[in-house]
């Protein structure tokens, strides 16, 4: 059976949110290792570049009282909430169209 395009779009968005969440987790793990582990680390630079849009969005929606140090944590919470919302939306679309989705 052919999957409707709106369900495919939500599935793709949810997959991108999963990648962003894992990148934020990996960035946080490298941050815990200390500054020497991340100063000239190419992998940390890739993680920072990959999560930059979500960190900027988190900075834009969070109040000024939130320190820049905690902005990646806010970004992770934002990505997690969006991931849950995409899952609920996908489940709703699948049940409304009587399509079996995994």
Image: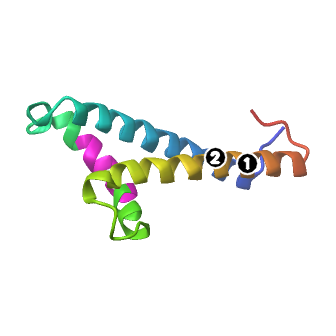
Residue at the spot 30% in from the left edge and 38% down from the top edge: 27
Disc 1 crowd rating (10 Å Cα; few below 14, some 14-19, many 20+) is few
Q: Residues within 10 Å of mark 2 (few under 14, many from 20)?
A: some
Q: What is the tally of numbered marks visible in this picture?
A: 2
Q: Secondary structure at mark 2?
A: helix
Judge left or right: residue 24 versus residue 4: left
Residue 34 image position (x, y, % from top left): 15, 33
Q: Is residue 34 above or below residue 71?
A: above
Is residue 95 covered in magenta? no
Residue occupied by mark 1: 88
Q: Nearer the viewer, residue 66 or 40?
A: 66
- Tell me the element at label 1: helix
Nearest the eye: 36 or 1: 36
Q: CA distance from mark 1 to mark 2?
A: 6 Å
Q: Which stretch appears magenta?
A: 46-54
- Give the x, y percent position of residue 87: 68, 45
**55 to 99, vertically: above or below:** below
Res 84 label? 2
Q: Quadrant of residue 39?
A: top left
Q: Quadrant of the N terminus?
A: top right
The quadrant in which the C terminus is found is top right
**Residue at horizontal 8 percent and vertical 37 percent from the top:** 40
Q: Report the residue at 26% width, 47% height from top.
A: 48
Which is the main secondary structure of the residues drawn in magenta?
A: helix
Q: Is residue 4 left or right of residue 30?
A: right
Mark number, residue 2: none
Question: Percent x, y for residue 35?
Answer: 11, 37
Q: Are marks 1 and 2 in contact (CB under 8 Å)?
A: yes
**Would you identify the image quadrant in which residue 64 lies?**
bottom left
């Amino acid at each position: 059976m052919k999957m409707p395009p709106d369900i495919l779009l939500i599935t793709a968005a949810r997959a991108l949110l999963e990648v962003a969440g894992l990148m934020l987790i990996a960035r946080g793990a490298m941050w815990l290792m200390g500054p020497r582990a991340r100063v000239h680390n190419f992998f940390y630079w890739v993680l920072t570049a990959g999560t930059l849009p979500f960190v900027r969005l988190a900075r834009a929606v969070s109040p000024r009282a939130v320190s820049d140090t905690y902005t990646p944590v806010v970004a992770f919470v934002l990505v997690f909430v969006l991931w849950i919302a995409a899952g609920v939306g996908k489940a709703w679309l699948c049940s409304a169209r009587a399509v079996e989705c995994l």
